[in-house]
Image: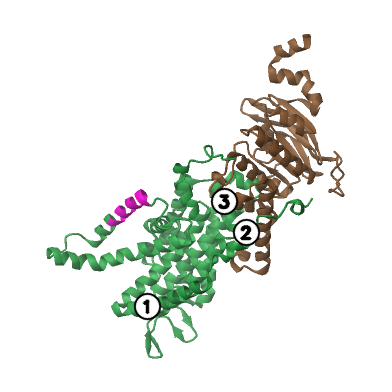
Chain colours: A green, B brown
Amino acid sequence: MDRASDASLKSYAGVGGFVASRRHPAFAWIGVILVALALIALPFALATIGTAWVRITNLAILFVFLALGLNIVVGFAGLLDLGYIAFYAVGAYVYALLASPHFNLHLPFWAILPLGAAVACMFGVLLGAPTLKLRGDYLAIVTLGFGEIIRIFLNNLSQPVNITNGPQGVTLIDPFRIGTINFRNTDTFAGLAFTGPIKYYYLLLVVLVVVIVINLRLQDSRIGRAWEAIREDEVAARAMGINTRNMKLLAFAMGASFGGIAGGMFSAMQGFISPESFILVESIMVLAMVVLGGMGNIWGVILGALLLSFAPEVLRYTVEPVQRAMFGRMLVEPEVIRMLLFGFALVLMMLFRPAGILPSATRKRELEGGRTNGVQGAAPR
Amino acid sequence: MTTTSALPAESPGASLLVGEGISKRFGGVQALADVSFDIRRGEIYGLIGPNGAGKTTLFNVLTGIYAPDGGRFTFDGQPLGGQKPNDVAARGIARTFQNIRLFANLSALENVMIGRHVRTRAGVFGAMLRNARTLAEERDIERRSYELLDYVGVAARANDLARHLPYGDQRRLEIARALATDPKLLALDEPAAGMNATETASLSKLLRAIREGGTTILLIEHDMKLVMSLCDRVLVLDYGKKIAEGVAADVQKDPAVVAAYLGGDVALHLKGT
């Protein structure tokens, strides 16, 4: 029976080389240390410009979480989800309701965050289960509807029993606390002032590293390959014994959990949430981050999220002074310019880098398919 | 064939897959009508018939892509009814497709590694934690996949995209991917289609080697030379009905088979002469 034994074991070069080639030890570690130092120093550098910039950075990191979570669903498993922000909302509300005067509950964050992830995960399965047979446009429409349903529920669940407090939202949400360290206050360690946002920044940085590692590992695993197989050819994937139903649900659940955790942290950082924060445009924004950066490529998705998070803020702070200097008054609102540049960027992207700024190897091949045009021609034997 | 000593408890010649009265209808078309057959362990079983005879439909019903309207399969002593394609693969039936369905944008190696999915266990937590067991399993998947690529003869192109492989190699890669699921029955849908004589000869060698390794093969094929030289027994379908089953040489002479392939009149003429 053992086919392995009679197959000759010649070409083995690639087996170990795959892992080994990833790091040229010395260079890689110096690089990692430099980047780490830069990231550790970053909030203090930003704080000299203004604490607002630390907050903006924190929100950008939250969007990186969201984009990475959505990337599991869209990039890995190939399921177009237009209602992803709903899971962010679920996570945010779970945290808000369990750590605020609204119900007079003040549970610690380390208990609520996993709970928020679990509830979001459950909603992920809830969305996934009825949509298993849908693909492409149809799936997009259902998920879009789902996102709206969640938002409308949050808006209206103030009657007959006040659960979400409706459009007024939930206020005075507890910040994170670790021992006596409150993430809203400023503490001074070793002569450095650690403001609230700076503390959140470090926390987010730690979580970010964990999230990136999890994503990289998922992609390069049995599960990640199963997702890729489903994206490439669902019929063949099933014929190869992949339980496509479970794998799709898993993709929805994993993506949703990331959204849930990001939502919980958003709640704690902002101290106030309302349904306004979870509108359709936010879903589309996260999807745009994934697509712009490069669907399926974790580093591309991170880049996309950072670009689209920072760009509007940079514009907000530059458009007005520039116009005043040039014309003496403000002609065009930053918001308008933002949308203009946004559309322009998307057009440029579609023209020059259709697979995203940092495309995943697979997507790149797919979109360049026209040039090599498959198999028929090439048969050098 | 008595070369199947590698199967201890399972005596060669005993039934591996039995189909009884399999029927499938698409609207007004009776694609399969009451088809019965019996595939024995360790044999290469041919499934032939003119275009539209229902061969691929039988494959699809067998592998769970369609549910049969009537009849039942018994595989390896257990019923195989109404199971999903992935369950059928888990039971030990692997297939290839008439119009190659590789994961075109993944490498040849990745294609085969995906075939190992059903025989491996690592889940989300294994993937996230990368514990010793998961790592060992990953190494095992990669090693086995290289072996299979080597076995079918495409190891040199392990890192090429599946769709950049020459046509013959794609066919072979699909076989390697199917073998990665450790099948008891390997179902091949026209593996020699579009191959030249040299490629067909080497495919024939590969299929023999797979059978010697203890895997039973079910083969749809139009290349009669290949079928006659390779298959122990064949089943002939025409318009969804079984018209003959038996040893290849006998079936070839069967008037009903000749009629199906050449048209009734010709068969009558042949009979007359």
Residue A33 locus on image (x, y percent):
46, 77
Task: Give the residue at the far bottom of this rendering.
Answer: A190
Secondary structure under tag 3 reads loop
Does residue B134 appear to the left or right of A109 in the view shown? right
Does residue A190 appear to the left or right of B120 in the view shown? left
Membership of A335 in magenta stretch: no
Q: Residues within 10 Å of mark 1 (few under 14, many from 20)?
A: many
Does residue B133 appear to the left or right of A99 in the view shown? right
> What's drawn in magenta, residue-wise?
A341-352
Residue beneath label 1, please? A43
Membership of A343 in magenta stretch: yes
Q: Does any portion of residue A103 appear in the rendered image?
A: no
Secondary structure under tag 1 reads helix
Q: What residue is drawn where x is 52% and y is 37%?
A: A377
In primary-sequence order, the first of circles 2 and 1 is 2
Q: Nearer the viewer, mark 2 or mark 3?
A: 2
Q: How far is mark 3 from mark 1, CA to CA?
A: 42 Å
Residue beneath label 2, please? A13
Residue B85 locus on image (x, y percent):
66, 44
Residue B33 locus on image (x, y percent):
72, 27
Residue situated in front as seen by the camera: A283 or B51? B51
Residue beneath label 3, please? B107
